[in-house]
Each structure stands twice: as structure tokens, then as C-alpha cells.
Image (cartoon, rainbow, N blue to C red):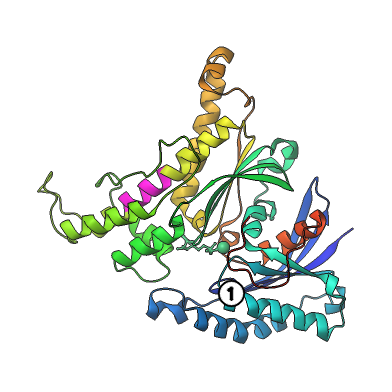
Amino acid sequence: MKKIILGIETSCDETGVALVEASGGLRWTKFKVLKNLVASQIKIHEPFGGVVPNLAKREHLKNLPILWKRCQVSGVRCQDIDLIAVTVGPGLEPALWTGISFAKQIISNFQFPISKLVGTNHLEGHLYSFLLPRKTRSKFEDRRSKIFPAIALIVSGGHTVLLLMKDLKTWKKLGETRDDAVGEAFDKVARLLKLPYPGGPALEKLARLGNPAAIEFPRPMIHDKNFDFSFSGLKTSVLYFLREYPLGSHLETSPLLKITNADIAASFQKAAIEVLVKKTMRAALEFGAKSVMLSGGVAANKKLRSDMRQAIRKLNSDMRHRTSKLKRNMGYVKSNGRVNFLVAEQKYNTDNAVMIAAAGYMAYLRKKKYPLRANGNLDI
Ligand code: KG4
Ligand code: ZN
């Protein structure tokens, strides 16, 4: 049975409203995007170099009715909406409340039963984004049985979490950041390099012009046995480096080489990505994963996507070339097949309401009920 889901996302600085058609159950779920609208607040927050919560709230209040009006799709009447999925956390509470109140208003205007309203976890939105449709048919669609167990890495502005997923409704947190999220580190380093807000995409762009081997920044916790992360030390190393060698100065070790901010950006990005990829691969090996999922705003980073893809290819090729005995000795005990790489199209990595509609539908299937109030610290 098909269901029409209205998704509403206002957890941070993007107002998102989307209409999604969902079908299938917990064994396999399919989504068709009918409308995907995002109003970005970049221009508003840019002069402040970061998100200003009260301005975000004001913009959501302004944008929500506009997007809702534009969200009319031919063939779908408002009365046809089966579920309204709204983000209840994590995020900025004043911003979250705007979405929740708006969703409640729709429920009341159309005299829908309150049971149509599904509180949705923003992180589950990222997690389930691999289920969203792609322009190019991905190979894994034909191998649905080869997804679980999966290792899921969620990398955003507020979170860096590694999960072990047993199926679409069961997962366990393996580790997370102990301080800054990786997106936060990208944003802070971008600010040190005087790049415009939002920092992550600007830093990635600049890094393309730099030498990633120019500076050996630390790779925090890369060799630790656990699956936790730490990125604040890496950011501080960039700060100390800039104090010692202001932009445009020369490295002592190679006085002929002028350090550029592109070199710093590329070297920082390399260090951060290396930690993410190494730990994800180690988890994939240890738990015999059949797939690795990458999601969240930082997953929009092309270098991270390509390095993760390459590492998975190497893992697959290593596995093909080892004898069973060697595989056992090296820890490939549970893994006996190919590892697939699952990542959504770039537009579904950064915040959007399509992923919220999808996660709302999954919460409905799982009978998971989040209270309909803003929870800035909601966990996954
Ligand atoms: O998921 P998201 O849109 O919002 C949160 O849930 O936090 O993630 C936003 C984060 C920001 O820190 C932003 O700088 C980062 O994702 N980001 C990137 C890129 N695009 C967005 N970081 C690195 N490279 C990018 N291309
Ligand atoms: Zn997000």
C-alpha cells in the first residue's frame, strides 16, 4: 500500500518541505520523491560566520508557509496526505519548534487525527538517506539481501557517529565523537582560513588547489581500538600552525616552499578524512559488513566519498586475493563477500525534508514514537 508523506525539516539553517510517496515494509522500503523544496538561509547567517538561532527561527517562520504553498503536486490533494513527518531533534530547539508548530497547524486546519503526525529523528533522516532514489540505478538495488550487517557513518555539523546496523530497524552505536563533530571542525578551520560561511563546502573547494601532503596534521585516535573520534585537537593543530606560520610564510623544513591556505585546507581535509575512512573500514572488517553507508552534510564532500569508495574497493580486492587462512588470520572472519558502498545523491546529504519524510515513514513502520516536542539533544 502506498502512502503519501509530508516531510518538514527545520532543525538548523535550512527550511525543508517535501512530499514523498512510500511503499513497502521493513524488509524493503521504496520512496518516490514528488516534491523537494529547501529554502537555504546562507545569505542571512553569512555576515555572522555561523548560524544565529533566533534568525534561523525567524526565517523558518517566514519560509514554511511559502514552501507549503509551493508544495502542491498535481494529483495529490492535501486530504491525500497519510502522514506528516516533522523533525523533533536533534538541532536548535527554537528552530525545531517552528516546524513542530507548523505541522500541528496543518493537522488542525485539515482536521486530521493527531496520529498522522510522526515526530522524526533528524539523525535517522541521514541514516535512511541511502534508501532514497538515485538518478542512476545503483547496482545494490539488485542485491537487496547484501546490505546487512552494515556499517553506517553519519557525519554532520553536530554529529560524527558510527553505527552497526543489523537490519532496517535494529542498530547499535559503535562510537561517536568525544568533542567536535567533523563538520564543526571543517567549519572552524574554514573560519581560521577566513573562508565564507558555510565553511565545509568552501574548504573543500579551496583544498582542491592545495597539496594535501604539505603539512602532516595529527590523525586523532586513528590507532585506538575503539570506534570513537576526536576532531578538536586537529582543529587546534591548524590554529597553532597558523600562529607559527601565518598564511604566506615559508616552512622551515622547506624554505623554498611557500605555504598557501589551500595547502592547509588540503592537509587538514586529508587528516580528517583519513581518520573517518580508517575507522569505518576497521569496523566493516571487524563486523563482517556487507555494506558501508555514508550520510550527513559532510558526506557531500567529494573527496570523502571518493576516498571511502576507494578504500572499499581496496578492501574488496584484498579479500579476493587472500587465501582463506590468511583471511582468518587477518580478521576477515565474518566477511566473505563484497562490501557495497551506499551513499545518497549529494542533494540528500545536506539537510532536506525528503530524508525526514523517509525516516518518518520508517518510524511509523517501526512503531517508534518520538514525543512531539523539540529535543535539541535527541540521540540515535
Ligand atoms: O547534515 P547537515 O547539512 O546539517 C547538520 O545536521 O548538521 O551538515 C552540515 C555540515 C556543516 O558542518 C557543513 O560545513 C558540512 O556539513 N558540509 C561539508 C560539505 N558540505 C557540507 N563539509 C565538508 N565538505 C563539504 N562539501
Ligand atoms: Zn543534518
- Relative to 267, 307 lies left or right: right
Q: Residue at x 80, y 49 (%)?
A: 26
In this view, the residue farthest toward the right is 1
Hey, what amino acid is under mark 1?
Glu
Task: Reply above or below: 27 against 104.
Answer: above
Q: Is residue 232 above or below residue 75?
A: above
> In the displayed structure, does residue 223 sit left or right of residue 149?
left
The residue that mark 1 highlights is: 93
Query: Does any portion of residue 134 appear in the rendered image?
Result: no
- Residue 76 placed where, x, y %? 83, 74
Q: Which quarter of the picture shows residue 79?
A: bottom right
Given residues 264 and 10, the one toward you in this image is 10
Q: Quadrant of residue 319?
A: top right
**Any part of residue 24 in sight:** yes
Q: Residue at x 26, y 59 (%)?
A: 239
The location of residue 142, given as percent across then percent down, is 74, 40
Magenta stretch, overall SS: helix
Q: Verify whether residue 271 appears in magenta.
A: yes
Figure quarter occupied by ligand 2: bottom right
Q: Position of residue 89 (x, y in %)?
A: 63, 66
Location of the N terminus by quadrant is bottom right
Q: Which residues are magenta?
A: 266-274
Q: Nearer the viewer, residue 358 or 218?
A: 218
Judging from the image, what secondary structure is the residue with disc 1 in? helix
Quadrant into which the C terminus falls: bottom right
Left or right: where does residue 48 sit relative to residue 282?
left
- Tell me the residue at 69%/55% (across/down): 132
**268 w.r.t. 174: above or below:** below
